[in-house]
Image (cartoon, rainbow, N blue to C red):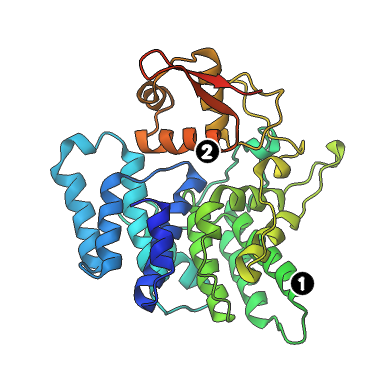
Amino acid sequence: MDNQIFEEYMREKEPQKREKGYAWHTAIGLQAVDGLETSEYLLDVAEKNIAGDITFEEANRLIHSYYKENVKHTGNDRTEEADRVSVRIAQLLSEKTFVLSPAQYISIHARLFEGVYKHAGKIRDYNITKAEWVLDGDTVLYGGALDLRATLDYDISQEREFSYKDLSIDQVIKHLAKFVSRLWQIHIFSEGNTRATAVFFIKYLRTLGFDVTNDIFAQNAWYFRNALVRANYNNIRKGVHETTEFLELFLRNLILGENNELKNRQIHISGTLETPKCQNDLQNVTLDVTLDESVVLNLLKKEPQITQEKIARTINKSSRTVKRIIDSLKEKGLIKREGGKRFGYWSVQF
């Protein structure tokens, strides 16, 4: 089941199928914030659940059995993680319950990552840094380990007391961008912080009356994370200041149905998409491409006759993902297939 079929379910007249289609689409798309991909098997499970053939509990059991009984599938722990967490996100997004509280936030993390991380639902007790592509390898300054719970309690209590009455929609969106960016920046969890924050935030938006049943999160998960990074980063020496402008564009698309351009290269502190030198040699080319696409472009440039199977092995991605990348590059006019099937090659168009 591909994105097109998800979209078909999201256009369903039957509310339950439509909502489940959205929940699954978002759940699978959110794995991109940590560079994860789900398996083909999970897509089959998702379709059965959306169609009403199995419950979420049965979906969880099927995924558990799949990895427990089939040793050959357990080689990629990250794919297993993506599958397990996707089912749980879809289930949480399908539930109507929510309370704006620190306990709810922590509970969401616990439910998403139980059995995946030993620290599921636990507040980290050490300080962290994370090298970010969007910051040229620099890190956001995250909350200190000793102050995490107090900071979380304060931020959520402030939001609970905040009144949206008489605010314009622009003011609402700006406030929401600041709230979610601050919540994310505390980073109370060692891992899985962005996915837990996204689920918490989506459910909170619903309590404010926003439907947000579209594919913005699913298709722009990496943009969402990069926007959170830029909302919490200052480097005065380089003339870089924290800004929620990118988050606001994301939220305007999510909440208002606008069609603002969401391009990661525009979030990069240089204003262009610069790919790490260790991955390829296209860093001097400004393109509207993702990091994965730029890596594949470099492979095609160096080895025009490379097969998609070899690309998949080289970049450690599934054949399905490589085909999607190739199709996207062709649609953007960046590559073209020349010659016949047997002796054909890829021509990079720049």
Whole-percent x and y of residue 202? 53, 68
Q: Identify the element where label 2 is drawn.
A: helix
Are the two marked residues, 2 and 1, in contact with CB atoms closer than 8 angstroms?
Answer: no
Which residue type carries mark 1?
Answer: Asp
Q: Is residue 64 left or right of residue 94?
A: left
The residue that label 2 is drawn on is 328
Which numbered disc covers residue 307? none
- Residue 84 shows in the view: yes
Whole-percent x and y of residue 211? 54, 75
Whole-percent x and y of residue 289? 61, 36
For the point 45% across and 39% down, the residue is 324
For the point 35% across and 25% down, the residue is 309
Q: How far apart are the alpha carbons under marks 2 and 1?
A: 33 Å
Q: Is residue 225 left or right of residue 238?
A: left
For the point 48% across and 44% down, the residue is 34
Front in this rendered view, residue 338 or 283:
338
Which numbered disc covers residue 170? 1
